[in-house]
Amino acid sequence: MSRLRFISVALPLLAAAAPEAAPGPSKLPPDVALHHVMPEEALPVLGHVVVGPDGKPIARLVNILIDADGKPVAAVLDFGGFMGVGTRRIAVHWDTLRFTPANIDTQIILTMTPAQIKAAPQYTDHTKPAPVVGPAPPKGSAGQP
């Protein structure tokens, strides 16, 4: 309870001090650099609709799985359902997605077939190894007869 009182008292003080405390480009510490990422160079992806190769909406991108270096490994896609009921989540390899940030009508395209999507195991528990589906390695490469 006292914690809530502290927050309610502190908020007006923070709001009053906010204009002066907000660091602008010239007030950044010397060990921090400001970079600008242009809209044609990068695309926010969480929550975006994912379309199939035919351009029809098929899923929504709801999470990204990254490796120890911070690089994306897989995307968690939410398929089907109505208002969150009856949905099915699968993790797809990052290489199965195509992005075009420079396009104003940007779409995220999943290059998997409906049969591949249907056969994919469901992603249900982030505390266990994720079943990630993606392109099979070419025949004759490691692990292939």
Image (tube, rainbow, N blue to C red):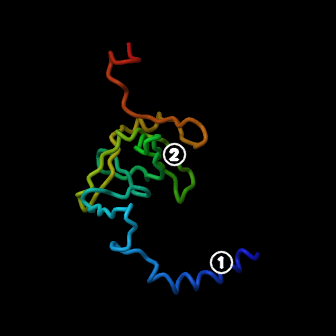
Q: Quadrant of the C terminus?
A: top left
Which residue in the rendered view is the most extreme toward the top? 145
Pick whichever, 16 or 100, lies toward us.
16
Residue 4, above or below 131: below
Residue 96, above or below 144: below
| Picture residue at 52% right of the left edge, 57% below the top | 82
Find residue 22 and report its horizontal and vertical position in percent.
43, 77
Q: Secondary structure at mark 1?
A: helix
Please state which amino acid type lies under the numbered disc 2.
Arg
| Picture residue at 26% right of the left edge, 52% below the top | 100
Q: Which mark is residue 52?
A: none
Neighbour class for label 2 at 10 Å: few (<14), some, many (≥20)?
Answer: some
Q: Which mark is residue 7?
A: 1
Pick whichever, 136 or 44, lies toward us.
44
Neighbour class for label 1 at 10 Å: few (<14), some, many (≥20)?
Answer: few
Count of marks placed on residues: 2
Q: What residue did someone put label 2 on?
A: 89
| Picture residue at 44% right of the left edge, 58% below the top | 47
| Picture residue at 46% right of the left edge, 40% below the top | 67
Please state which amino acid type lies under the numbered disc 1.
Ile
Q: Locate residue 136: give its quadrant.
A: top left
Find residue 131 and report its horizontal and vertical position in percent.
51, 35
Sequence-wise, which precedes: disc 2 or disc 1? 1
Find residue 53 and report its horizontal and vertical position in percent.
30, 44
